Image (cartoon, rainbow, N blue to C red):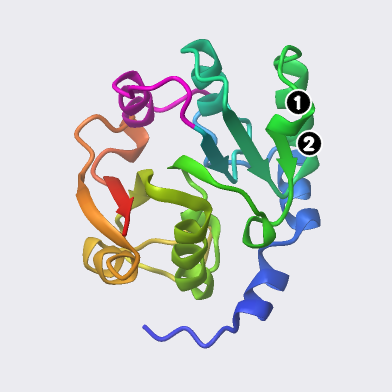
Amino acid sequence: MTWKISEQTSMKMKLNSHYWENRYLTNDAAWDAGSITTPIKDYIDQLEGKNLSILIPGCGNGYEFEYLMEKGFPNSYVLDYAESPLRNLKARNPGCTDDRFIQSDFFVHEGTYDLILEQTFFCALDPGLRAAYARKMHTLLAPGGKLAGLLFQFPLTEKGPPFGGSEAEYRSLFSEYFEIKTLEPAYNSIKPRQGNELFFIFTKK
């Protein structure tokens, strides 16, 4: 399938704060599992080095952030285009400083991180932005930094989000910028997503 959507057009279509804000305000967030999902939780549980600088882009309600706080990772940050989920997340975590909650377009965000967690952000982007996503992730990571999390594996469609994808596509997309350490079916997906998720760990080249 060939996507003939420019990056600027894609951003206007999907990466629009009003679009995402409206979805949260109307409770149209079917991707929200209501808690941190098992693959991400298990990955965080095995992390070493509590001073890792961690970013969660497209964080939504930020269950992963709250779990990182609970597990003692103080240098964790969340980013989202919509204001409401960030405001709610901040209210639930009053001990966190304001700089932890970043309302911004991911593609213009600047920073350096040791780890970036992917959880239903990639699948929400128009597929025309996938190459830009890979480049931006590479830019945001420190040398040897890791991009890890979950990617959906079901046929790519023009209707979304979520948009689908395949292991072959992901290997082709990310291999220019990352060493693919792990990319395999998630054995511990939550029930609604069983068989439809790939767990991955990519290391910046």
Q: Is residue 77 left or right of residue 16?
A: left
**Up-down: is 91 above or below 17?**
above
Q: Which residue is mark 1?
A: 88
Q: Pinpoint residue 15: horizontal percent, then vertical percent.
A: 68, 62
* Foreground pick, 18 / 68: 68
Q: Is residue 139 left or right of residue 195?
A: right
Q: Pinpoint residue 158: horizontal percent, then vertical percent.
A: 48, 73
At 51% from the left edge and 70% from the top edge, which residue is drawn?
132
Quarter the N terminus occupies: bottom left
Q: Is residue 198 visible?
A: no
Residue type pointed to by label 1? Asn
Q: Pinpoint residue 64: horizontal percent, then vertical percent.
A: 51, 27
Q: Is residue 37 left or right of residue 200?
A: right
Q: Pinpoint residue 8: horizontal percent, then vertical percent.
A: 67, 79
Quarter the C terminus occupies: bottom left
**Mark 2 crowd level (few <14, some 14–19, many ≥20, 10 Å Cα):** some
Is residue 18 within the magenta segment? Answer: no
Q: Which residue is mark 2?
A: 84
Q: CA distance from mark 1 to mark 2?
A: 6 Å
User: Which structural element holds mark 2?
Assistant: helix
Is residue 44 within the magenta segment? Answer: yes
The part of the image, by quadrant, that contains residue 48 is: top left
Q: Is residue 18 left or right of residue 171?
A: right
**Mark 1 crowd level (few <14, some 14–19, many ≥20, 10 Å Cα):** few
| Count of numbered circles in the view | 2
At 77% from the left edge and 55% from the top edge, which residue is drawn?
17
At 72% from the left edge and 72% from the top edge, which residue is drawn?
12
Q: Which residues are magenta?
A: 34-52
Residue farthest along the front direction in this orientation = 143
Callouts 1 and 2 close, C-beta under 8 Å: yes
